[in-house]
Amino acid sequence: MMNEFTKEVIKIIKQIPLGKVMTYGQIASVAGNPWGARQISRILHAMSNKYHLPWHRVINAKGEISLKGEGGLYQIEKLSEEGIKVVNNKINLSIYRFENNLN
């Protein structure tokens, strides 16, 4: 049984449009738990494939790619394909952040 927070997180992540990103903390806050950023990471890890989540559009609060190694390179590649400019592992949040206040 999935809890309401997890359902809300999945809904929010699915709403991130092509060419935009959200941070772990931003998603947690919009979903109702401003301290739940680590939970977002766990949800992405466990449910991205099952729910076809655009996991690559979720980044850390500094605008950086959190994944290391091949995973991080793959994320940069996917973001670049969507027109998001990644410089030194960083994304300009003032340009690419999706402000999701929809719920």
Image: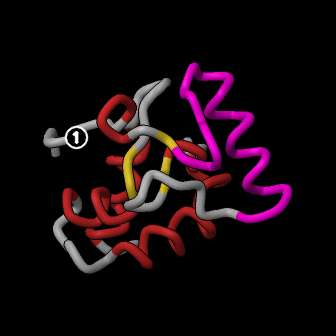
* Segment colored magenta: 68-90
Residue at the (65%, 28%) spot, across then down? 80
Q: Residue tagged by mark 1?
A: 100
Tell me if residue 7 is in the magenta stretch: no
Residue type (three-letter) at the residue carrying disc 1: Asn
How far from the left and from the top, in percent, is residue 92? 42, 38
How far from the left and from the top, in percent, is residue 22? 38, 47
Q: Name the one closer to the observer, 98 or 86.
A: 86
How far from the left and from the top, in percent, is residue 53? 55, 46
Residue at the extreme right of the image, as rendered: 70
Colour scheme shown: secondary structure
Quadrant assignment for the N terminus: bottom left
- Looking at the rendered structure, the secondary structure element under dot 1 is loop
Q: Is residue 76 left or right of residue 53?
A: right
Q: Is residue 21 visible?
A: yes
Quarter occupied by residue 39: bottom left
Residue at the (38%, 61%) spot, across then down? 61
Q: Name the one closer to the observer, 56 or 92.
A: 92
Q: Is residue 8 visible?
A: no
How far from the left and from the top, in percent, is residue 93? 36, 41
Residue at the (78%, 45%) spot, across then down? 74
Tell me if residue 73 is in the magenta stretch: yes
Residue at the (17%, 67%) spot, across then down? 32
Quarter occupied by residue 38: bottom left
Q: Is residue 55 left or right of residue 20?
A: right
Residue at the extreme front of the image, as rendered: 88
Q: Is residue 88 left or right of residue 27?
A: right
Q: Residues within 10 Å of mark 1 (few under 14, many from 20)?
A: some
Q: Is residue 2 above or below residue 88?
A: below
